[in-house]
Image: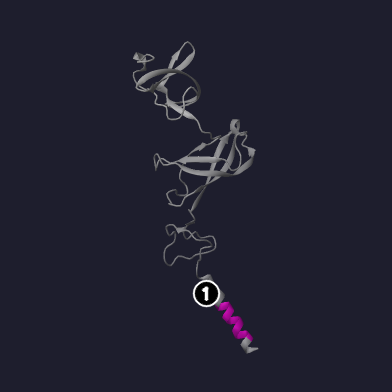
């Protein structure tokens, strides 16, 4: 009986000792200490922060008009003013079941891999959703020569300018998709096309 009583006291002492340590429930990066030495710490006291930043959970809103385009697994591209010109790619992992009646937007969550730990929790990011991806030919806008409702470009073939009618598609700033009329690897004239003639 004495041995059982001593074992119970030992277990109680071990439990009190265990409660005097704070152990992280997962691996991560510890933030600044929020308490000072000697402070009384309770269950509700914030001692520090712990962040697992190997991947970032990104919450964002999408206007109702794009709801048909939004789907799980779609690719997103995010940029931060902290790292200009450095895109971060991820994918949509969750979509809310309701549209906010005030903002007329739906909330979505994406996961962005962050192996270099460049992104920090709380940062603002600009999001781009990739609605579709396809291989296209693009030419600079300044290569196009509009005439009588059609678009033309000048190719360089054997050192001579060859005028070619083209069918254009989507536009992005500075570039135009060419659906027909040129092939990959063709050399397209981009300057001085106003003074250029076929065969010059």
Please name the residue shown 34% across and 18% down the image. 192
Principal secondary structure, stretch drawn in magenta: helix
Pinpoint residue 149: horizontal percent, then vertical percent: 49, 12
Residue for badge 1: 17
| The stretch drawn in magenta includes residue 11 | yes
Q: Residue 12 lies in what quarter of the image?
A: bottom right
Dot 1: few (<14), some (14–19), or many (≥20) neighbours within 10 Å?
Answer: few
Where residue 183 appears, as percent x and y from the top left, is 47, 27
Considering depth in this image, is 3 or 109 the residue closer to the camera? 109
Question: Along the line of sight, which residue is nearer the eye, 166 or 37?
Answer: 166
The quarter in which the C terminus is drawn is top left
In the foreground, 57 or 112: 112
Q: How is the image coloured?
A: one colour
State the SS at label 1.
Answer: helix
User: How far from the left and from the top, in percent, is residue 161?
Assistant: 37, 19
* Residue furthest front as drawn: 158
Q: Position of residue 50 (x, y in %)?
A: 48, 57
Quarter of the N terminus within the rendering: bottom right
Is residue 41 within the magenta segment?
no
- Vertical position of residue 114 compared to residue 46: above or below: above
Q: Looking at this view, name the residue that lies furthest to the top.
A: 148
Side of 142 where 90 appears, left or right: right
Residue at x 59% of width, y 32% of height: 66
Please report the bounds of the magenta region as a residue range.
4-13
Front residue of 35/77: it is 77
Q: Count numbered badges in the picture.
A: 1
């Amino acid at each position: 009986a004495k041995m059982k009583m001593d074992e119970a006291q030992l277990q109680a002492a071990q439990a009190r000792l265990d409660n005097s340590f704070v152990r992280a429930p997962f691996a991560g990066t510890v933030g600044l200490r929020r308490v000072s030495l000697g402070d009384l710490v309770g269950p509700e006291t914030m001692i520090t922060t712990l962040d697992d930043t190997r991947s970032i959970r990104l919450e964002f809103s999408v206007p109702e008009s794009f709801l048909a385009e939004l789907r799980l697994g779609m690719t997103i591209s995010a940029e931060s003013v902290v790292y200009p010109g450095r895109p971060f790619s991820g994918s949509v992992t969750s979509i809310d079941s309701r549209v906010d009646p005030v903002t007329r937007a739906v909330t979505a969550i994406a996961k962005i891999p962050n192996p270099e730990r460049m992104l920090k929790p709380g940062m603002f990011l600009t999001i781009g959703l990739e609605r579709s991806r396809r291989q296209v030919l693009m030419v600079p806008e300044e290569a196009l020569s509009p005439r009588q409702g059609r678009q033309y470009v000048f190719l360089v073939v054997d050192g001579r300018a060859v005028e070619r009618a083209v069918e254009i598609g989507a536009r992005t700033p500075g570039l135009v998709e060419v659906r027909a009329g040129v092939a990959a690897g063709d050399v397209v004239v981009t300057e001085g096309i106003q003074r250029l003639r076929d065969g010059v």
